Image (cartoon, rainbow, N blue to C red):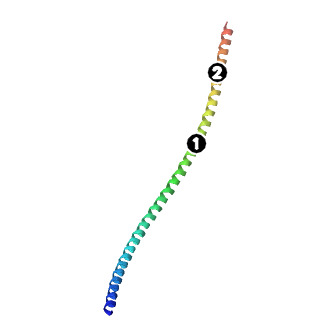
Amino acid sequence: KQWYQRRVREQLKEELIKETYKRKKLKERFLELQDLVNDESVVLVKEVEKKDEEIEALKEDIADLKDAVTQAEEDRDKAKEKEELLLEECEKLNQAVDDLEDQLKASQRDIISYKT
């Protein structure tokens, strides 16, 4: 009976040693994996921060482009206004030329009728 108990104790000790070894290896592997996850997390966080910076830069570029478009539209509107004013001025000048031509013709007729 003692022999049997001793044998059972030895087997239990061996199993305990094996389980302790397995547990130690599992813990080491867990820590390795945890380090890998932490390293990967750091890399991912840096990538996310970089992407956030890129997004902010793009937002600034978009805002600048919107401002440029607004300025271009304002410049176009001013140019249209100037064009309209110039067209009105041209019409006035054309009318003045027409009036002068009419006066010249009338003067020429007066001169011709004076001579005759």
Badge 2 marks a residue whose secondary structure is helix
Q: Is residue 35 above or below residue 75?
A: below
Mark 1: few/some/many CA within 10 Å (<14, 14-19, 20+): few
Residue at horizontal 50 percent and vertical 53 percent from the top: 58
Badge 1 marks a residue whose secondary structure is helix
Residue that sits furthest to the top in the current view: 116
**Type of the residue with mark 1:** Glu
**Type of the residue with mark 2:** Asp
Give me the disc on residue 73: 1
Residue at horizontal 34 percent and vertical 88 percent from the top: 9
Nearest to viewer (mark 1 / mark 2): 1
Residue at horizontal 35 percent and vertical 85 percent from the top: 12
Q: Is residue 85 above or below residue 74?
A: above
Residue 82, percent across and down?
Answer: 61, 36
Marker count (numbered): 2
Residue 49, percent across and down?
Answer: 47, 62
Q: Earlier in the sequence, mark 1 or mark 2?
A: 1
On the picture, is 56 further left or further right than 14? right
Say whether marks 1 and 2 touch (CB < 8 Å): no
Front-lying residue, 58 or 93? 58
Front-lying residue, 35 or 49? 35
Give the Cα distance between marks 1 and 2: 37 Å
Position of the C terminus by quadrant: top right
Residue that sits furthest to the front in the current view: 1
Residue 60, percent across and down?
Answer: 52, 54
Q: Which residue lies under the disc numbered 2?
A: 98
Residue at horizontal 66 percent and vertical 18 percent from the top: 102
Residue 89 occupies quadrant: top right
Residue 1, percent across and down?
Answer: 33, 92
Give me the disc on residue 7: none
On the picture, is 61 further left or further right than 113? left
